[in-house]
């Protein structure tokens, strides 16, 4: 279960990433952030974001038109 949840549904690139970055900044290492997005580009965006920042992409899946991610702050 994630420590914090971010609803980024209805937002287009780059807003889901910007909001996730801001949320992660206020979290401590080891905590995780669950994100819901409707932007199809967010799949590649969050994978790249985690590679660049060193945070761990714990999960990435799709339920209908909603993309779900869980990122663990390292």
Image (cartoon, rainbow, N blue to C red):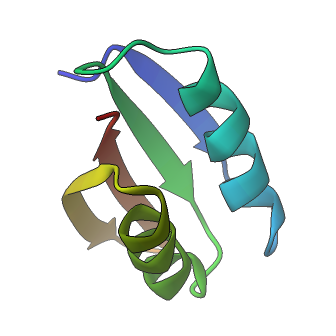
Residue at point 40% right, 12% down? 28
Q: In this view, does 70 lie above or below 72?
A: below
**Residue 62: image location, x then y, percent:** 31, 71
Q: Is residue 61 above or below residue 29?
A: below
Q: Where is residue 61 in the image (x, y as percent from the top left)?
A: 25, 68
- Horizontal arrangement in the rendering, residue 36 relative to residue 3 (left or right): right
Q: Which of 68 and 3 is in front in this view?
A: 3
Q: How many marks?
A: 0
State which quadrant residue 50 falls in.
Answer: bottom left
Taking the spot 47% from the left edge, 57% from the top edge, the residue there is 53
| Image quadrant in which the N terminus is located | top left
Residue 61's place in the image compared with 4, above or below, is: below
Q: In this view, does 49 lie to the left or right of 41?
A: left
Relative to 33, residue 12 above or below: below
Q: Which of 17 and 38 is in front in this view?
A: 17
In this rendering, position of residue 66 left or right of residue 29: right
Residue at 51% across, 50% down = 36
Task: Give the camera-side residue of 33 and 27.
Answer: 27
Q: Position of residue 44 (x, y in %)?
A: 47, 86
Write the residue at 56% across / 76% down: 42
Where in the figure is residue 35, as x and y percent of width and height?
48, 45
Quarter of the picture containing the C terminus is top left
- The answer to which of 44 and 37 lies nearer the viewer is 44
């Amino acid at each position: 279960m994630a420590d914090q949840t971010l609803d980024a549904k209805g937002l287009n690139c780059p807003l889901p990433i910007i909001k996730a970055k801001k949320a992660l900044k206020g979290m401590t290492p080891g905590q995780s952030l669950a994100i819901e997005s409707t932007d199809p580009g967010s799949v590649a965006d969050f994978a790249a974001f985690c590679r660049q920042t060193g945070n761990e992409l714990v999960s990435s899946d799709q339920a209908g038109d909603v993309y779900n991610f869980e990122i663990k702050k390292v």
